[in-house]
Image (cartoon, helix red, strand yellow):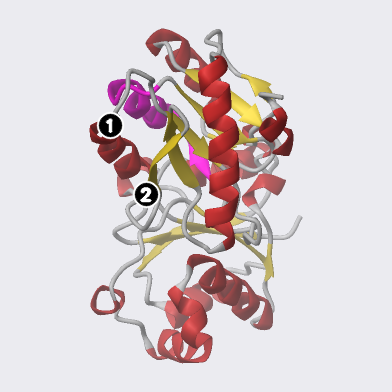
Amino acid sequence: MKKLGIVAGQGNLPLMLVRACQEENRPFYIIALKEHAQPELYEQDLPISWIRLGDVGKGLKIARDNGVEEIVMIGAVKRPTLSQLRPDWRGFKFFAKAGIKALGDDGLLKAVVRELEKEGFSVIGAHEILKDSLSCLGQYGKVKPDKQALKDIAKGYQVGKILGQADVGQSVVIADGLTLAVEAIEGTDALILRSAELVRSAVKPVLVKVKKPNQETRVDLPTIGIQTIINVAQSGFCGIAIEAESAFVVNRPEVIKKANELGVFVLGIDEKCQQITD
């Protein structure tokens, strides 16, 4: 098997990928992003180097020096300001060439993939390895959405796809047919917390996460985990809908257990959810 370079951002997904490589006896090397990946998650004996997000040249050299052939980019990365990024010369050349494409998530990620491929690396999606962590169609736990929640899910799917076409975000919050909030640069957790203050009826909100129509799925898929369940429950939501085969569910058994415990539903949906209320 080809040696896998794991460009690691925030959260447990990169570590899950490491464990999958270990189980398959697949060679790997971790390139962890400072201020994004959490050092406490990684054992000292793992093959790993730490770089800043702007250290493009250094990252490429590390990958080559360690025999990396395929690359996976996995884990959340908060977009920095230019002053925080401080790109090295190789990074500066990349952003200068990317130009206007660097202003949007989709355009930037596609430009990154193209650049890595030009450098001789194959970019693969984490979902090709973490197949058991991909979202599936149907109900996850014991809690079922009611009729109003199903209507709101259908509305959320439609709104999410429209916003995704404009490269806005992956998540929307719907309550009683109204769009309360959409995800921007702040991320899903912050979206949930601010949405709790916007409820104007007795109907509990629903979080809907869908893939953008033109999304580069090899490097960017929606993700939920135990903390997402806790956040929606504490913020008074009735549940979460995620697009099937297009999102990661981190630690699925524990997500289901926590959802049952806190009384919120988790539902895998597809494009037919728009016909749920027919």
- Identify residue type, mark 2: Gly
Q: Is residue 231 magenta?
A: yes
In the image: residue 122, left or right of residue 187 = right
Q: Residues within 10 Å of mark 1 (few under 14, many from 20)?
A: some
Q: Which residue is identified by label 1?
A: 196
Q: Position of residue 12 (x, y in %)?
A: 45, 40
Of residue 270 and residue 149, the one placed in the foreground of this image is: 149
Q: Nearer the viewer, residue 194 or 91?
A: 194
- Upstream in sequence: badge 1 or badge 2: 2
The percent coordinates of residue 59 (x first, y second) are 47, 74
Q: Is residue 15 visible?
A: no
For the residue marked with disc 1, what is the amino acid?
Ala
Point out residue 5 in the picture as x, y percentages from the top left corner.
Answer: 58, 61
Q: Residue at x 63, y 44 (%)?
A: 21
Relative to 146, residue 30 above or below: below
Q: Is residue 69 above or below residue 99?
A: above
Circle number at residue 187? 2
Q: Nearer the viewer, residue 234 or 119?
A: 234
Q: Secondary structure at mark 2?
A: loop
- The magenta stretch spans which residues? 222-237
User: Does the rendering let one see residue 187?
Assistant: yes
Q: Is residue 229 magenta?
A: yes
As drawn, 105 above or below 271: below
In the rendered image, the quadrant that contains the C terminus is: top right
- 195 or 258: nearer the eye? 195
- Label 1's element? helix
Q: Between tags 1 and 2, which lies in front?
A: 1
Q: Please identify the quarter of the rendering in which residue 131 is found.
A: top right
Left or right: 267 with respect to 237? right
Badge count:
2
Instruction: Give the alpha-carbon distance from disc 1 to disc 2, as whole Å.
Output: 15 Å
